Image: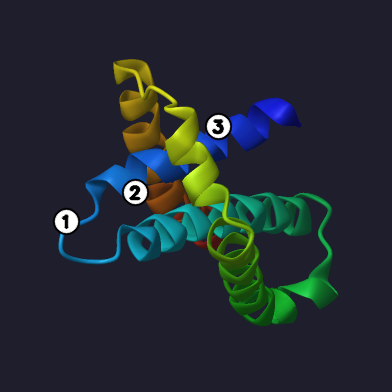
Amino acid sequence: MNFITQFYDKLFLRFYKLGKPGGEPKVLAMILTSTIQATNILLILTFLVFIFDIEYLIDKLPLTSILMFGGSIIFNFYRYQINGQTEILIEKGIEIKNITILLSIIFLFISMVFPLIMIYLFNEVF
């Protein structure tokens, strides 16, 4: 569990440093991190629904996706804004290595493209 927390902290810092100097970089970092978290949880849920053929949950997937995105945004807002985790991470001086930058780009790409591939596969193949 500690590995996952550290990974998302580094991912948050990576997106935080991408923010515009005049703007609020926390907003971009929270939105991108929340989107990635919600998409990954939703992918697992969708995969389980179709694998175990739980038909009554298919109608509830759109509502579940909205709740997942909303819940992850609220969770990350609490963690990084209210709880002050952003300042703690910046004070620690965590170095973001090139491999972390590469992994964050790949992770963001997979999180955005993989749901489209799954939709195509479930509609056309299964």
**Residue 9 visible at all:** yes
Residue ID at (76%, 49%) = 51
- Give the amino acid at mark 3: Phe
User: In the rendered structure, which disc, 3 or 2, sits on the residue that comes first in sequence?
Assistant: 3
Q: Which mark is residue 21?
A: 1
Tell me if residue 22 comes above or below residue 17 in the rendering: below
Q: CA distance from mark 3 to mark 1?
A: 24 Å
Q: CA distance from mark 2 to mark 1?
A: 10 Å
Residue 71 rendering spot, x and y as whole percentages: 66, 71
Write down the quadrant of residue 98 in the picture. Answer: top left
Write down the quadrant of residue 90 in the picture. Answer: top left
Residue 118 rendering spot, x and y as whole percentages: 51, 52
**For residue 34, side relative to residue 20 (left or right):** right
Residue ID at (72%, 73%) = 58
Q: Given the current orientation, which residue lies at the most extreme front position?
A: 91
- Give the amino acid at mark 1: Pro
**Residue 116 visible at all:** no
Residue 110 rendering spot, x and y as whole percentages: 42, 41
Residue ID at (66%, 76%) = 67
SS class of the residue under badge 1?
loop
Residue ID at (76%, 52%) = 48
Tag in front: 2 or 1: 1
Q: Which residue is mark 3?
A: 7
Q: Which residue is mark 2?
A: 16
- Give the amino acid at mark 2: Tyr
User: In the rendered structure, which disc, 2 or 1, sits on the residue that comes first in sequence?
Assistant: 2
SS class of the residue under badge 2?
helix
